[in-house]
Amino acid sequence: MLNIVIFGPPGSGKGTQSEKIIERYGLVHISTGEILRKEIKEDSDLGKIAKSFIDKGELVPDQTIIEILEKKLESLNNVKGVIFDGFPRTVDQAVALKKMLQRHGEDVNVMLNLEVDRQELIARLLKRGQISGRSDDNLETIEKRIRVYEERTFPVIDFYKKEGTYTPIRGVGEINDIFKRISDAIDAVKV
Ligand code: ADP
């Protein structure tokens, strides 16, 4: 299997690039943000819990997210690989993912870190908020999400550096040029 973690701060283009990766490589897309937004729309118990964190720009508790991931992974069979988008967001989540994959004799093959500077992130997210109407794409929540990213998610980079799969990607410029950088990095990985 080809297992990819697409990583980066909010607004770095993880979702956009994931769609292109799935198309080219035929992978299953697991986006924790999308799963949570679906639960919120359905007003499920999980959705109610998730909304209280998301609207404040905070992370949903690790235990909740890890359980969602476990269920999702168990439901897959005969897949070419998975792209993890928005997960792991904490070092504990990264450790949990490693254990989950290990049970199936798998591991993360490449971690792609989309690098985009703060000013560009804020501009992109404000623009997205006008179109998508996402409740967390307003200036106050955006700034909080970036702070949470810096404090809790950034350390995940070190985890993957130690794993030897860390790959920085310049996330600024034309969508297709960024995708070229990504696909070159994926093609360089021998699975
Ligand atoms: P973005 O990358 O733009 O922040 P996402 O759709 O990935 O968008 O995530 C939106 C929100 O969902 C996050 O701010 C967080 O509250 C919650 N969330 C998503 N994935 C996770 C995760 N792995 N752990 C904890 N919270 C998460």
Image: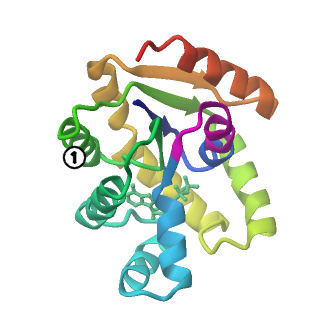
Q: Taking 41 as reference, is 71 left or right?
A: left
- Residue 105: image quadrant is top left
Q: Secondary structure at mark 1?
A: helix
Q: Main secondary structure of the magenta part?
A: helix
In the rendered image, residue 76, in percent from the top left (x then y), is placed at 38, 52
In the depicted structure, whether residue 58 falls above or below residue 97? below
Total number of numbered discs in the rendering: 1
Q: Which residue is mark 1?
A: 96
Q: Is mark 1 within 8 Å of ligand 1?
A: no
- For the rendered model, the colour scheme is rainbow
Q: Residue at x 77, y 24 (%)?
A: 177
In the rendered image, residue 61, in percent from the top left (x then y), is placed at 29, 65
Give the position of the N terminus as an image quadrant: top left
Q: Nearer the viewer, residue 161 or 41?
A: 41
Q: Residue at x 61, y 40 (%)?
A: 22
Is residue 23 rendered magenta in the image? yes
How crowded is the residue under tag 1: few (<14 C-alpha within 10 Å), some, or many (20+)? some
Q: Taking 78 as reference, is 123 left or right?
A: right
Given the current orientation, which residue lies at the most extreme front position? 78
In the rendered image, residue 153, in percent from the top left (x then y), is placed at 38, 45
Give the position of the C terminus as an image quadrant: top left
Is residue 189 rendered magenta in the image? no
- Residue 171: image quadrant is top right
Q: Taking 121 as reference, is 38 left or right?
A: left
Residue range of the region highlighted in magenta in the rendering: 17-28
Q: Residue at x 56, y 57 (%)?
A: 143
In the depicted structure, whether residue 78 falls above or below residue 168? below
Q: Residue at x 56, y 66 (%)?
A: 141
In the rendered image, residue 45, in percent from the top left (x then y), is placed at 36, 87
Q: Nearer the viewer, residue 40 or 9?
A: 40
The three-letter code of the residue at mark 1 reads Ala
